[in-house]
Amino acid sequence: MAIILGIESSCDETSAAICIDGEIRSNIIANQLVHQHYGGVVPELASRAHQQNIIPAIQEAFSVAKISKNEVDAVAFTRGPGLLGSLLVGTSFAKAFALAKNIPLMEVNHMQAHILAHFIQDPKPNFPFLCLTVSGGHTQIVKVNDYFDMEIVGETLDDAAGEAFDKSAKILGLPYPGGPLIDQYAQSGSAEAYSFPEPQIPGLDFSFSGLKTSILYFVQKNVKADPDFIQKNLPDICASIQQRIISILLSKLKRAAAEYQINQIAIAGGVSANSGLRNALQEMAEKKGWQVFIPKFEYCTDNAAMIAIAGYHKFLKKDFVDQSIAPLARMAF
Ligand code: KG4
Ligand code: ZN
């Protein structure tokens, strides 16, 4: 039997999870509401909040999983990429715990873990599959050859898809993080109401900065003509913005599937919680004959269950690190 403690602290969620023989028994996520006042994550405040949240999150993860700290076989933690001060909290805790209990330590790449969240539940994809990973900091199409053998075949040249959602929301005066709010308003709006340009980027790469600028100009122009423009048309504006972000993502995904002749397609990361993207992907799958893998909501945004499952697969390979390990703000696959 293998009991893994997973710890995630890369950005603004402090999370702890217990995985027993590949099955998630607890996944505790402490959100940091402090950032809402600032319109984005404030790194210094994030590290302090991790310090406050980490012990209660760990305690609860043990209590929900009904196991004791002495039963843990190994600890997995997010080494990067992320905010260094935030990563340091989870890394230091994991190292101290492993040292105190004399158990192995496993480093996990946060972006790989988002993809490995697909191995928490059935149905699980077979290798190789393609994964569109869309979060607040990344937008990538990844060819997943094995648990820890992944190739980035396309990525954003500027903003991430999550940033495109959050920055658009900010232009509309919505609080941070605006992605989920755009999703919510879009549900009662018309996606055909307004048309935003599609960037012409060759290959499998993405670009969202032009879209952000065109939304800014569009809003400024219309608010000048009618100061209540946003208020009167919020659902339609959100639906149109969301539609364009989705069409940019799916057109590249379609291209990647054709290029690599792969029809097992997954999505991962915070933006994969977007209901419009989930529906559009299902529709495209039916048209193209793809088998799609869409994570449960709680495994889309940052969580330690994905770190624990990645750790479980490292544990099976005895892929351990020693106490000299340090977190990395930038971390390649
Ligand atoms: O993966 P994640 O939790 O954190 C990072 O690793 O970045 O992703 C956070 C991003 C934010 O930009 C947030 O606005 C976006 O995911 N997001 C959404 C939705 N839920 C979260 N974007 C659009 N629609 C949603 N429902
Ligand atoms: Zn993430």
Image: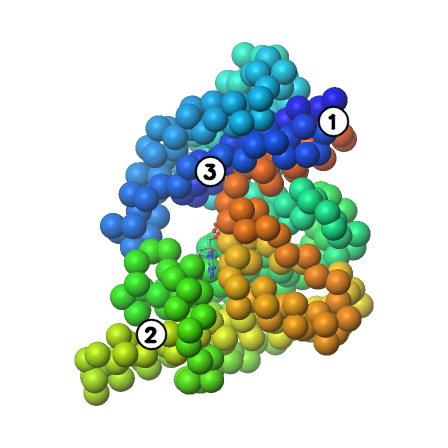
For disc 3, the neighbor class at 10 Å (few under 14, some 14 to 19, many from 20) is many
Residue type (three-letter) at the residue carrying disc 1: Lys
- Where 178 sits versus 111, above or below? below
Cα–Cα span, label 3 and label 1: 27 Å
Residue type (three-letter) at the residue carrying disc 3: Ile
- Secondary element at tag 2: helix
Q: Is 169 positioned to the left or the right of 204 in the image?
A: left
Q: Quadrant of residue 55?
A: top left
| Mark in front: 2 vs 1 | 2
Q: Is 88 positioned to the left or the right of 200 in the image?
A: left
The residue tagged 2 is 234
Residue type (three-letter) at the residue carrying disc 2: Leu
**Badge 3 or badge 1: first in the primary sequence:** 3
Residue 29 marker: 3
Q: Considering depth in this image, is 151 or 77 the residue closer to the camera?
A: 77
**Badge 3 or badge 2: first in the primary sequence:** 3
Q: Disc 1 beta carbon < 8 A from ligand 2?
A: no
Q: Residue at x 64, y 49 (%)?
A: 115
- Secondary element at tag 1: loop
Q: Quadrant of residue 26?
A: top right
- Where 302 sits versus 192, above or below? above
Q: Considering depth in this image, is 56 or 223 the residue closer to the camera?
A: 56
| Mark in front: 3 vs 1 | 3
Q: Is 124 positioned to the left or the right of 16 in the image?
A: right
* Residue 35 screen position, x and y as percent: 30, 47
Cα–Cα span, label 3 and label 2: 31 Å
